[in-house]
Amino acid sequence: MAVFTRRELVSTFAGLAARGALRADDAKALVSGVDHLKLRVANSGASMMFYYGLFGGEIIAAHNSTLPDTPLVNEFFLKIGAPRFPYLVFAQVRADELPGLDHISFLVSDSVAIRSSLEHHGVPLIEPGQWFRDADSTLVELMPSPTFGIQAQSIRSRSP
């Protein structure tokens, strides 16, 4: 049996209330899936090879940055399994970063409507307007099309 402190209960109920508020505009209908999860790792190549060795998959190497105007790093996108999405992305940490979750990227059917819903609920957007932080400060990306595919629009460039 789990025992919760008052602080944990208040935090849980606050999270549930925030989730309920976002449902009021039915924002969930605007999200069609997860495109990718990006992890900051000590060695992007070694991390990618670890998961590839365990599960196989499709590897796409890139020289990329999460947000515009930030330094590029070596990254590896690893697609595991049959569905098109999501990708695991392993990004090399920079000198001032720690390993961990960089961001989660959601595919959205109507990015204007979901941005409007977020603004309506007081969630500040990070320019160029397709990013925000959740209640725990996790960076979230909204993507109108998949990272890789016919309609891909991205700041990413594949490495040779």
Image (cartoon, grey):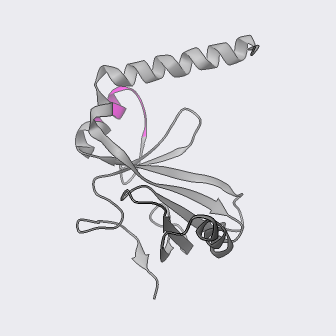
- Up-down: is 149 above or below 103? below
Going 36% across and 63% down the picture, which residue do you hit?
A: 147
Is residue 156 shown left or right of residue 63? Answer: left
- The image quadrant that residue 119 belongs to is top left
Quadrant position of the N terminus in the picture: top right
Residue drawn at (54%, 22%), measured in percent from left and top? 15
Task: Find residue 65 and report its horizontal and vertical position in percent.
Answer: 50, 67
Q: Nearer the viewer, residue 90 or 115?
A: 90
Magenta run includes residue 15: no
Q: Nearer the viewer, residue 22 or 78?
A: 78
**x, y (%) of residue 64?**
49, 72
Span of residues in magenta: 116-124
Q: Quadrant of the C terminus?
A: bottom left
Q: Is residue 118 magenta?
A: yes
Location of residue 128 in the rendering, given as x and y in whole percent from the top left corner: 36, 54
Q: Residue at x 59, y 66 (%)?
A: 91
Identity of the residue drawn at 72% across and 57% down: 98
- Provide residue 30's location: percent of width, then percent of height: 27, 38
| 125, above or below 127, in the image | above
- Asked whether, in this view, residue 2 is left or right of residue 135, the answer is right
